[in-house]
Image (cartoon, coloured by chain):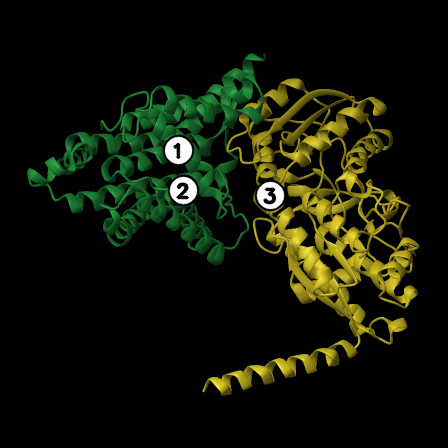
Chain colours: A green, B yellow
Amino acid sequence: MNLDTIFQALVSGILTGGLFALVAIGLTMILGVLKIVNFAHGEFLMLGMYLTYYCYNVLGIDPYLCLLISIPIFFLFGVAIQRILINPVLKSPMEIQILLTLGLFFFLQNAALFFFGPYLKSIKTGYARAIISIGSVNFSSTKLIMFLFSIAFTLVLYVFLKKSDLGKAIRACSEDSYGAMLVGINVRNVYMIAFGIGTACAGAAGTLLMPVYYVDPYIGLTFVMTAFVVVVLGGMGNYIGALVGGFIIGLTESLGAALFTASLKQLATFVIFILILLLRPTGLFGARRM
Amino acid sequence: MRKYLVLIFASIIMTMTLVTPARAEAKEVRVGLLYPISGPIASIGRLCVQGHQFAVDKINAEGGIKSLGGAKIKLIIADTEGKADVGMAEAEKLIKQEKVVAIFGAYQSGVTFPTSQVAEKYKTPFLIAQAVADPITERGFKYIFRTQFKASWNAVYTLDILKWLGEKYGPMAKTVALLYENTLWGQSTAKMWKRKCPDYAFKIVGDFSYSKTATDLSSTISKLKGKKPDAVLQISYLTDAILVTKTMYELDFNCMARIPSGGGHSDPRFIEAVGNLGENIIVNHMFHPSLKGPGTKVQDVNEAYKAKYKDDMDDYSASSYSITFVLKDALERAGSTNGEKLRDAIATTDIGINNSPSIYPYALKFDKTGQDPVATGIATQYQNGKLVMIYPEEYASAKPIYPMPSWKERGLR
């Protein structure tokens, strides 16, 4: 086995892991606070990519500057979705909630098909071609930027949850919404904000992904499937777990492809998924402790 | 009130029964199209249908089938949804209810396989312009005809191109690596390559399959780079083709030739997404509008098509377009829509290259199995952002660039 390949795999795995973490963190927040499995999460990411695409191609806004647009837009979008669609089913049985988010998934995917067409779109930025070489290891600058933003975004969110009053309220609702209500927290508002933040994470991930990847209406599922594994791996609702889980899955995929064959890499991911569910259903770090 | 309703319904049914024979008298030849026009590959199915429609509009405008008193061809479109079971039910419906005289279909090999069996049962000719799986014409059926090369021929064709490049332009590639997506298409082609490479004295130094939904292929390309192959033979759909190309650039992987077999690399969206990173990739496929000769036939047809559908012809529409003339020719010679007579006429098809309305670069005829024995592909290469024909030489519009310059030589890194 070629040592260069291993180094390359390590670096690629960590870089992709950062993105997986960002997608998974939004998912795990919604799961932890609202106790809802959001199947439409990947579609928020897809819409984030389209927003970035049109910002760049129509308005000429740099994709990274577009974060300033996509984060607030998707926060508000998430708040609206929660208010109009999720809130009415919060006390309904789980099947109803799953059907609702699944319905939203199909709706958004088909809306994207209708409005944006079935064909893939990608953007060409000047710096997409900038390659960073360290010894025999190569990676594109856009992947590094994506990684750094993902980590920064995650850390800011972490500090917000730990230190701010609102963050503490979100954590309180996540642990015991009834108790939170008793001590005077406006649980309805917290739900809205948590869903908004979760959606904003997906939107931001979409924006960061756009310079690296391409977008079509089906792209959401590709990433969200991995994100679900990350969420389960880190413990459902566990914030740091999602971050670490993202890196574990990123490294599993790239090292799996380097040591065995690329055909097996997703197999490895889902083997981990099944093993965790069987042996440690609360995830590596335990569930819902933000 | 009820009585009136009954009366109204009765009169509607009466008129319908009265109208039907009148319609049958109006001369038309009903032909079935069996393609996936909904579902994940609907965009391709629709291009196939478009190709047939374009050909039929031309035939009808030029006076229809003369030996049948100028009968017009009417296309009855059925949707397989990309599924074998739906396709079989639809094929049966086309034959039994719609009374079609022949069926064109069904793009996917997996759907063509069982649906053509239905046509065979009812002695209705089934004409195949796209499905390439070898066994389709190897079942001893009498009503199945294919104008497309077999998958295995195509794999060999890739090797022919590589050998031709080595002999004519040099140096000859000694080692090759296989890089393919891991569904049936990639795996079966790779199997063929593995069997045939020794005949060409190409040594396979790497064998890499990947999932086409992969989001990162750095590890695979890094391993590929470690093997230092002279040439890469590739099977990719669109999104993975883009990812592979970008990753090869990122990891500074260079080789003498990259020859993917059709698929994603021939899609216009590929070059749009990768820009000049796609330069000098050789794409092996069925058809290309820059196909030269005979005369300007291909360009004329393409221009007319473009005027109507706002897009160049592609593998799908061009193959559908061409095969439609096989049926037209057979109907003219048979002078009948009887299944057996039509079958015999198709079996004796002999449409040469020069004066045929088909835009394929080879003659249309069939061997005993219903396969066109001279069917072949073409090779094109991205030069200055456009695909140009490079092989076979007699139809080529440009000389190949070989060996492929490295990223550094191109000033990209």
Density class for disc 3 (Cα within 10 Å; few <14, some 14-19, many ≥20) is some
The kind of secondary structure element at disc 2 is helix
Density class for disc 1 (Cα within 10 Å; few <14, some 14-19, many ≥20) is many
Q: Residue furthest front?
A: B3
At horizontal 80% and vertical 47% (from top left) the residue drawn is B148
User: Marks 2 and 3, Cα distance to the nearest angstrom?
Assistant: 28 Å
User: Marks 3 and 1, Cα distance to the nearest angstrom?
Assistant: 31 Å
Residue kind at label 3, given as amino acid type? Gly
Residue kind at label 1, given as amino acid type? Ala
**Residue carrying label 1:** A227
User: Front-most of B171 and B348?
Assistant: B348
Whether labels 3 and 1 belong to a single chain: the reply is no
Quadrant housing the N terminus of chain B: bottom left
Q: Residue furthest left?
A: A183
Quadrant housing the C terminus of chain B: top right
- A265 in relation to A47, above or below: above
Residue A133 placement, left or right of B50: left
User: Front-most of A177 and B219?
Assistant: A177
At horizontal 76% and vertical 24% (from top left) the residue drawn is B194
Residue kind at label 2, given as amino acid type? Gly
What percent of the width, then of the height, locates residue A224?
41, 37
**Residue carrying label 2:** A42
Residue B44 placement, left or right of B170: left
What percent of the width, then of the height, locates residue B170?
82, 28
Q: Are marks 1 and 2 in contact (CB under 8 Å)?
A: yes
Q: Are marks 2 and 3 in contact (CB under 8 Å)?
A: no
